[in-house]
Image (cartoon, grey):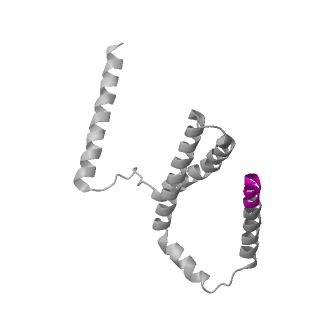
Amino acid sequence: MSYFKLNMMIYKIEKYIINYFRYHLFKKLCGAQMENERKFNKRAFLAVGMFISFIGLPVSGYMNHILGSTDMSVEKHLWMSIHNVLATFFCIFSIWHIKLNWKPVKNAFKKMTDIIISREALYAFALVGVFLTLFILHAVHLNR
């Protein structure tokens, strides 16, 4: 390695160390943020966390359904654990999301007091009710 390359490498290391300490000293003394530093976005974190756990829950639930009739194996235990962890994270993220967005949720409920159940809501309840009934009857039929 040439003398010039070694000097450049040392210069870059020194520059990095100086900038590192300058940044942390400024942050500590002023209690302010540097202009290129972004604050941690809780809403984005919650949205991504809820989305990942929401996508993973049906997959792990389906695998639990497939492995449901087998004895307890490592694979079944793995999918049950994945499903439980994802469900726990989804519940935590959902509660935290509601807490962060409490004012809009309250305003939405205040606006809903004036509205009688709409046709769309009735159709949605009917659709969910029909499918729920079909799946419940399917489970009852299997137990006979």
Image quadrant where one finds the C terminus: bottom right
- Give left or right: position of 132 versus 30: right
Q: What number of labels is visible?
A: 0
- Of residue 102 and residue 67, the one placed in the foreground of this image is 67
User: Most prominent secondary structure in the magenta stretch?
Assistant: helix
Q: Position of residue 117 (x, y in %)?
A: 69, 81
What residue sits 65% from the left and 50% below the top?
A: 58
What residue sits 57% from the left and 44% below the top?
A: 80
- Give left or right: position of 81 versus 7: right
2, above or below 56, in the image: above
Quadrant housing residue 64: top right
Magenta span contains residue 141: yes
Query: Residue most toward the front?
Result: 144
Q: Position of residue 18 (x, y in %)?
A: 27, 37
What residue sits 58% from the left and 37% below the top?
A: 72
47, above or below 18, in the image: below
117, above or below 60, in the image: below
Q: Position of residue 74 (x, y in %)?
A: 56, 33
- Give left or right: position of 116 versus 103: right
- Magenta stretch bounds: 136-144
Quadrant housing residue 138: bottom right
What residue sits 28% from the left and 31% below the top?
A: 14
- Of residue 115 and residue 58, the one placed in the foreground of this image is 58
Magenta span contains residue 48: no
Q: Position of residue 41 (x, y in %)?
A: 45, 56
Image quadrant where one finds the N terminus: top left
